[in-house]
């Protein structure tokens, strides 16, 4: 698929080196956007940027660090002449029940998933508030909408991302900023994140097929989603096709939350 749905957009995508962030970068460039990939993974990020050509570049980003965010925004503005769009896709999913994980592990997940998205929104609003057609797309999860006993930190972080999105969206409305802020909630999407669970399942004695089937079975559509399906929803929320949509939740979950 290619077109010009994002022809005027300049996006900074956190977590852009892998999975949903990388698929979004591909779709954004295919739709005419210029894209800065921000990620801890320099080699993967730089390789993807090179593959995507002059409309893409890589910059180092640790979403837990405000100075790193500011440097990434400045790098995007310097390279492409502005910024219209922030996609907060960086994230980790580390399992553990309330009895298994300690405060340090809890805070580690929160620092990346929730603090990281908070900082992306904060520097994003600052950078976008004087412009037109701004959009921030946060990545929540089905597990930010309903619980999962082994996903203590992940559920807490993604529930936080969901409500953070609404607070920031309403603030932008109140201030008259042309910035829409929305949250896309994926179900299980076949990325490196899910590959991590598959590897753990195999290490625990399960087959690859059984782990995938386990993930698929909780979705009414009985399969995993693809990174491209998640990216398509992000394209919509970043584009001017969704100009009356803010503070919203868009599910890409095979019916999981229905
Ligand atoms: N894959 C799924 O099933 C699924 C489901 C629901 C939500 N999500 C969410 O979607 C988003 C993308 O996940 P994915 O599946 O593409 O995972 P992924 O592991 O393929 O990609 C995540 C990226 O985030 C980067 N990252 C991690 N910590 C970072 C940090 N501190 N600073 C900058 N970058 C950092 C990683 O290097 C990686 O490139 C995450 O927020 C995740 O929680 C994924």
Image (cartoon, rainbow, N blue to C red):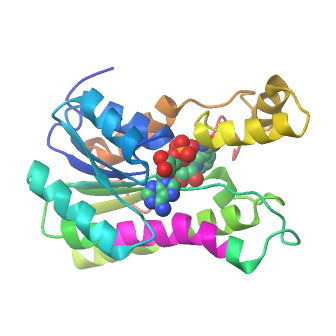
Q: Quadrant of residue 128?
A: bottom left
Q: Residue placed farthest to the front in the image?
A: 43
Of residues 47 and 168, the one nearer the viewer is 47
Left/right placement of residue 193 relative to residue 120 reads: right
The range drawn in magenta is 106-122
Task: State whether the magenta stretch is mostly helix, strand or loop.
Answer: helix
* Residue at image point 91% right, 34% down: 205
Q: Position of residue 138 (x, y in %)?
A: 45, 57
Q: Position of residue 17 (x, y in %)?
A: 41, 42
Say above or below: 176 vs 128: below
* Residue at image point 67% right, 30% down: 224
Q: Is residue 248 visible?
A: no
Q: Position of residue 149 (x, y in %)?
A: 84, 60
Of residues 163 and 202, the one nearer the viewer is 202
Which image quarter is the N terminus in?
top left
* Residue at image point 33% right, 56% down: 60
* Residue at image point 39% right, 72% down: 119
Q: Quadrant of residue 251?
A: top right
Q: Is residue 146 magenta?
A: no
């Amino acid at each position: 698929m290619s077109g010009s749905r994002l022809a005027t957009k300049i996006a900074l995508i956190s977590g852009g080196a892998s999975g949903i962030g990388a698929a979004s970068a591909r779709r954004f460039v295919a739709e005419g956007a210029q894209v800065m990939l921000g990620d801890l993974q320099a080699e993967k990020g730089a390789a993807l940027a090179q593959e995507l050509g002059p409309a893409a570049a890589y910059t180092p980003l640790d979403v837990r660090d405000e100075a790193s965010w500011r440097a990434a925004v400045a790098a995007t503005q310097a390279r492409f002449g502005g910024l219209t769009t922030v996609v907060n896709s960086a994230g980790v999913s580390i399992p553990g029940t309330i009895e298994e994980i300690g405060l340090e592990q809890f805070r580690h997940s929160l620092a990346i998933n929730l603090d990281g998205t908070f900082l992306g929104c904060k520097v994003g609003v600052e950078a976008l508030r004087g412009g037109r057609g701004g959009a921030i797309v946060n990545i929540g999860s089905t597990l930010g909408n309903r619980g999962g006993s082994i996903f203590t930190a992940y559920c807490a972080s993604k529930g936080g991302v969901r409500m953070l999105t609404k607070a920031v969206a309403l603030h932008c409305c109140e201030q008259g900023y042309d910035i829409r802020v929305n949250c896309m909630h994926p179900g299980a999407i076949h990325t490196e994140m899910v590959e991590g669970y598959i590897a753990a399942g195999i290490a625990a004695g399960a087959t690859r097929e059984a782990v995938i089937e386990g993930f698929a079975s909780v979705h009414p559509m009985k399969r995993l989603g693809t990174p491209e399906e998640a990216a398509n929803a992000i394209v919509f929320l970043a584009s001017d096709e969704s100009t009356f949509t803010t503070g919203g939740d868009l599910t890409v979950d095979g019916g999981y939350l229905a």
